[in-house]
Amino acid sequence: MLSMSDLVGKELRAAIRGEVITPDHAEYDRARRVWNGVIDRNPAVIARCADTADVVTTVAVARRHRIEVAIRGGGHQVAGSGVVDDGLVIDLAAMNGVHVDPDERTARVSAGARWADVDRATQLFGLATTGGEVSITGVAGLTLGGGMGLLQRAFGLACDNVRSIEVVTADGVVRTASADEHTDLYWAARGAGRGLGVVTSFEFGLRPLGPEVAAGWVVYPPDDARTVVRAWRDAALASPRTVSPELLLWAIPPDPEIPAELHGKSAVMALGLYAGDPAESSEVLEPFAELGTPLLDLGGTMPYADLQCSADELFPEGKRYYFKSHFADEIDDGAVDVLVSSFEARPTAESVVVVRTLGDAVDEVGADESAYPHRGRRFNISFDAAWSDASDDDRAVGWARRSWTAFRPFAAGGVYVNFAGFDDESDVTTAHTLGSADRLAQVRSTYDPEGLFTAAAQRP
């Protein structure tokens, strides 16, 4: 009797243009790996779809055999939901095209693309949309979960800039969802994460920005952390929508522009991208250079695409990661103490506490207009563990979880679905990540009544 791997693999090889990989394939171990090195799963079959027709066929095969499905776009999702043990991975990495219409200011982006692909294409025309802060982040995963980025207060979240999606639903039908058709699916796809079908492409609205942009990057000594965090909080709340301030309690990266003796030293960093003419940026960015006595001021003007990929080497594929987040409406002195204590207790130099500023364009989308439920929040606080040695797994994950628990009294409720820990988190459910769980369940039952994508939907 043929195994599920042999049965499904044989059927797919005869039916799709893309490559089909099973455990006996020479590329299997490489193909099953995702960005997060902690994730070590062994799917029965990996279908590397070449186009939407391949996706339709693969969904039909999955439905026929009732095999568990995982969908992999850019493969960057922290929890590793793009791969599943003993199931079928629908791998969209080969579907990574980006087509820009500069007249309409739109980009049609295939679901396997990463933000580097988008930035490269859109910047040819001096256009941009909110994308990931690391350019190797997959477009699909980031956008479906909401999509924070350095332009969010000016342009909105990534999902707020989606004009339409193409999606293959569980019945194998290719649907276009937008504000005018399949509006329930369009609502859910902007913030619900996954479990709706296989999104094969997005149409994004674009706005003028670049190629040159002004960015602030000011580094402060760790001994001044409490003072700097409080001053940053006040400056962030007072800042205009043209900047989305970020605070990083981290270690100084090995940048060639930084003296070598400072590499790896703990520091507090204030970051921000000015969403406008670089010549007009100084008044907006200057307050973040006056939070204390800086160690370094590394801000300046640079190509937007270069800024977007500047952190890629700090988050390489194969390193081990665990991210967990909170939303907050204020950061009082008690919250500052938790942030600084977490900073001082980091298990590795690579681990970081990140505070992102929200509001403005993010809040101009109505609470019922998308499945993203965290409108009205002022900050997102993420405890991001990063390490290399598997023997440090418990220590690194434990730090992030303890920090998250310690900050909970200061949180406003809700967890960002893209920073929700691992798939098996017992303290993060749909109710925590999405405020409209009942409405989302109804959409899923409409388009997936047999639950083909239910397992994917149940992962945080």
Image (cartoon, helix red, strand yellow):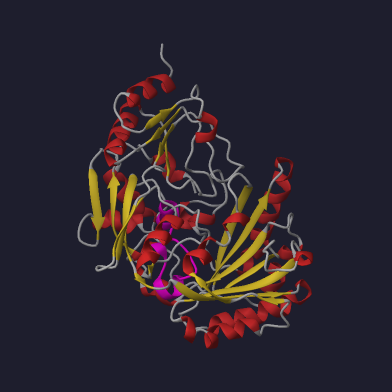
Is residue 432 visible in the rendered image? The answer is no
19 sits left or right of 330 in the view: left
Number of numbered discs on residues? 0
Check residue 389 for magenta coloring. no
- Quadrant for the N terminus in the image: top left
Percent x, y of residue 290: 66, 85
User: Residue at point 60% right, 50% down?
Assistant: 316
The foreground one among 256 and 222 is: 256
Range of residues picked out in magenta: 139-158
276 sits left or right of 409 in the view: left
Percent x, y of residue 133: 52, 62
Check residue 152 for magenta coloring. yes
Percent x, y of residue 7: 38, 20
Percent x, y of residue 85: 51, 32
The foreground one among 450 and 43 is: 43
User: Residue at point 45% right, 31% down?
Assistant: 87
* Vertical position of residue 42 compared to residue 187: above or below: above
